[in-house]
Structure formats: C-alpha cells, structure tokens
Image: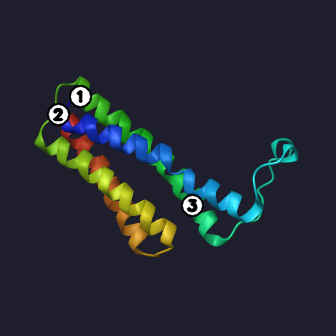
Amino acid sequence: MSTDLKYLAFTAILTASLWIPYVVCQVMTNGPLAPPNYIDPTPRPLPLWGKRADRTYVNAVETFAPFAALVIAVHLAGKADAMTAFWAMSFFWLRLAHAVVYLLGIPYLRTLIFTLGYVAVVGLFWELVK
C-alpha cells in the first residue's frame, strides 16, 4: 500500500471517530437518548466543549471528501510519489492537530492549522495535474 493510501485510511478512521467526544458530552450532560429524542431532533443543551466537539466532527467530514478524492485520483493516475506522500501525511497530522485545537477551543491556531490542511489538499491537486 502506498503512503498516500495509508494516510487516507488513517484520516478516514480519524474522521469516522470524531463523533465520539460529542456523544460522550451528550450522555454526560443529558443522559442517554430516550424515545422522544428520536421523534424530536431538536438539539439538547450542551456545554461549549460539546458544541465544539460537534463542529470538530462536521468540519472533519467536510474536508475529508476533497482529500480522499485527490488521494484516490493520484493513486489511479499512477502519480503517487514522495511529494504526494508528504502532502497526504501532512493532511492527516494537520487534521489531528486541528481536532485537538478545536476541542480545546484555541482560537487563531485552529484557523492556521485549517489553512495548512487546505494547502496540503492544494499540494495533492498540484501533484496530480502537473
């Protein structure tokens, strides 16, 4: 397996797991879901860290698709090399850092890390089209 695909898999499991802090917060704050919660989807009150946990997950899902599409396109085009591996690895570590910083509520650094993640996606795109 190429490094690009390995980091795609790592990013997939990270993204797929980021719902956990949100659900933990929901249960800690409001208890387990009850049958009426399935009928009325109105969000229950949460502390700020729980709201950030939800946004962390949603943000990870939103950024995963372009990254995944580019890694797969690079692989199918036979263009995987050291640079695409660098960009894929960078994206994973930046997304992990972004999740931690987002959950902790650290301003400015979160935006910087998010932007660097976008740069990694652009790097993959560039390697694909050049």
Kind of residue at disc 2 = Ala
Residue wearing tag 3: 53
Kind of residue at disc 3 = Ala
Mark 3 lies on a secondary structure that is: helix
Kind of residue at disc 1 = His
Q: For mark 1, does the 10 Å Cα neighbourhood hold few (<14), some (14 to 19), or many (20 or more) residues?
A: some
Sequence-first disc among 1 and 2 = 1
Q: For mark 3, does the 10 Å Cα neighbourhood hold few (<14), some (14 to 19), or many (20 or more) residues?
A: many
Residue wearing tag 1: 75
Could you say which is closer to the camera, residue 81 or residue 32?
32
Give left or right: position of 102 versus 29. left
- x and y, in percent, of residue 91 in the image: 31, 51
Q: Classify the position of the N terminus by image quarter.
A: top left
Q: How many marks?
A: 3
Residue drawn 19% across and 40% down? 127
Residue wearing tag 2: 80
